[in-house]
Image (cartoon, helix red, strand yellow):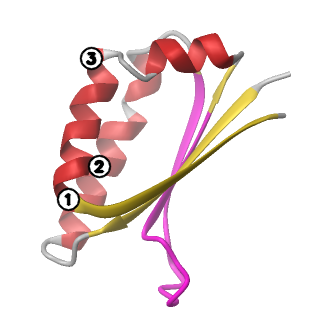
Protein backbone atom coordinates (compact mmCIF):
# COMPACT_ATOMS: atom_id res chain seq x y z
CA UNK A 1 0.00 0.00 0.00
CA UNK A 2 1.24 3.47 -0.88
CA UNK A 3 -0.11 7.02 -0.69
CA UNK A 4 -0.06 8.87 -4.02
CA UNK A 5 -0.07 12.69 -3.96
CA UNK A 6 -1.03 14.39 -7.25
CA UNK A 7 -0.95 18.17 -7.74
CA UNK A 8 -1.78 20.08 -10.93
CA UNK A 9 -0.66 23.67 -11.46
CA UNK A 10 -1.78 26.51 -13.72
CA UNK A 11 1.01 29.06 -14.19
CA UNK A 12 0.76 32.81 -14.73
CA UNK A 13 1.44 33.81 -18.34
CA UNK A 14 4.33 36.13 -17.42
CA UNK A 15 7.63 34.23 -17.81
CA UNK A 16 5.64 30.99 -17.93
CA UNK A 17 8.25 28.75 -19.59
CA UNK A 18 11.08 29.98 -17.34
CA UNK A 19 8.97 29.57 -14.21
CA UNK A 20 7.82 26.08 -15.15
CA UNK A 21 11.41 24.97 -15.74
CA UNK A 22 12.50 26.51 -12.42
CA UNK A 23 9.70 24.86 -10.43
CA UNK A 24 10.28 21.50 -12.15
CA UNK A 25 13.96 21.58 -11.19
CA UNK A 26 13.16 22.57 -7.61
CA UNK A 27 10.54 19.84 -7.23
CA UNK A 28 12.78 17.16 -8.71
CA UNK A 29 15.44 17.97 -6.09
CA UNK A 30 13.09 17.17 -3.19
CA UNK A 31 13.46 13.35 -3.05
CA UNK A 32 17.12 13.72 -2.07
CA UNK A 33 16.16 16.14 0.72
CA UNK A 34 13.06 14.53 2.28
CA UNK A 35 13.37 10.95 3.51
CA UNK A 36 9.66 10.10 3.44
CA UNK A 37 9.27 11.13 -0.22
CA UNK A 38 9.64 7.82 -2.09
CA UNK A 39 9.19 8.91 -5.71
CA UNK A 40 8.40 12.08 -7.60
CA UNK A 41 7.54 12.68 -11.22
CA UNK A 42 7.00 16.17 -12.64
CA UNK A 43 5.47 16.65 -16.08
CA UNK A 44 4.89 19.75 -18.20
CA UNK A 45 1.76 19.60 -20.36
CA UNK A 46 2.29 19.23 -24.10
CA UNK A 47 -1.34 19.33 -25.29
CA UNK A 48 -1.99 22.98 -24.39
CA UNK A 49 -5.75 22.41 -24.59
CA UNK A 50 -8.37 24.52 -22.81
CA UNK A 51 -8.81 21.76 -20.24
CA UNK A 52 -5.09 21.36 -19.55
CA UNK A 53 -3.17 22.40 -16.50
CA UNK A 54 0.42 23.44 -17.18
CA UNK A 55 2.20 21.01 -14.87
CA UNK A 56 1.51 17.88 -12.85
CA UNK A 57 3.36 16.48 -9.88
CA UNK A 58 2.93 12.82 -8.88
CA UNK A 59 4.70 11.77 -5.70
CA UNK A 60 4.48 8.71 -3.50
CA UNK A 61 4.82 8.07 0.23
CA UNK A 62 4.62 4.93 2.34
CA UNK A 63 1.60 6.34 4.18
CA UNK A 64 -0.23 9.46 5.37
CA UNK A 65 2.43 10.02 8.02
CA UNK A 66 5.06 10.31 5.27
CA UNK A 67 3.03 13.01 3.53
CA UNK A 68 2.63 14.79 6.87
CA UNK A 69 6.43 14.95 7.23
CA UNK A 70 6.83 16.22 3.64
CA UNK A 71 4.22 18.98 3.77
CA UNK A 72 5.82 21.24 6.43
CA UNK A 73 9.43 20.30 5.55
CA UNK A 74 11.56 23.41 4.93
CA UNK A 75 12.77 22.19 1.51
CA UNK A 76 9.16 21.64 0.39
CA UNK A 77 8.01 24.96 1.83
CA UNK A 78 10.76 26.76 -0.12
CA UNK A 79 9.30 25.35 -3.36
CA UNK A 80 5.74 26.12 -2.22
CA UNK A 81 6.62 29.80 -1.76
CA UNK A 82 7.93 30.00 -5.34
CA UNK A 83 4.91 28.10 -6.68
CA UNK A 84 2.54 30.54 -4.96
CA UNK A 85 4.27 33.45 -6.71
CA UNK A 86 4.17 32.00 -10.23
CA UNK A 87 0.88 30.08 -10.37
CA UNK A 88 -2.77 31.09 -10.48
CA UNK A 89 -4.35 27.78 -9.50
CA UNK A 90 -3.51 24.36 -8.15
CA UNK A 91 -5.60 21.24 -7.47
CA UNK A 92 -4.68 18.17 -5.46
CA UNK A 93 -5.75 14.53 -5.18
CA UNK A 94 -4.36 12.13 -2.57
CA UNK A 95 -5.24 8.44 -2.79
CA UNK A 96 -4.14 5.03 -1.56
CA UNK A 97 -2.71 2.68 -4.17
Residue where numbered disc 3 is placed: 74
Q: Secondary structure at mark 3?
A: helix
Task: Tell me where residue 59 appears, x and y as whole percent.
Answer: 59, 36
> For the residues marked 3 and 2, what is the alpha-carbon distance in whole angstroms?
16 Å
C-alpha span from label 1 to label 3: 19 Å
Task: Give the residue at mark 2.
Answer: 23
- Choose the circle earlier in sequence order: 2 or 1: 2
Residues in magenta, as a range? 38-59
Point out the image quarter for the N terminus.
top right
Q: Nearer the viewer, mark 3 or mark 2?
A: 3
- Which residue bears the numbered disc 1? 86
Examine the image and state in which quarter residue 51 appears.
Answer: bottom right
Name the residue located 36 percent from the left edge and 63 percent from the top edge.
Answer: 89
Give the quarter of the figure containing the C terminus.
top right
Distance CA(mark 2)–CA(mark 1): 9 Å
Residue, far bottom: 50
Amino acid sequence: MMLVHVVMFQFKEEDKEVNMARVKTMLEALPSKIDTLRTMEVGIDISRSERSFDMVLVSTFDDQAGLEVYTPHSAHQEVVSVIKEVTTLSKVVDYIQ
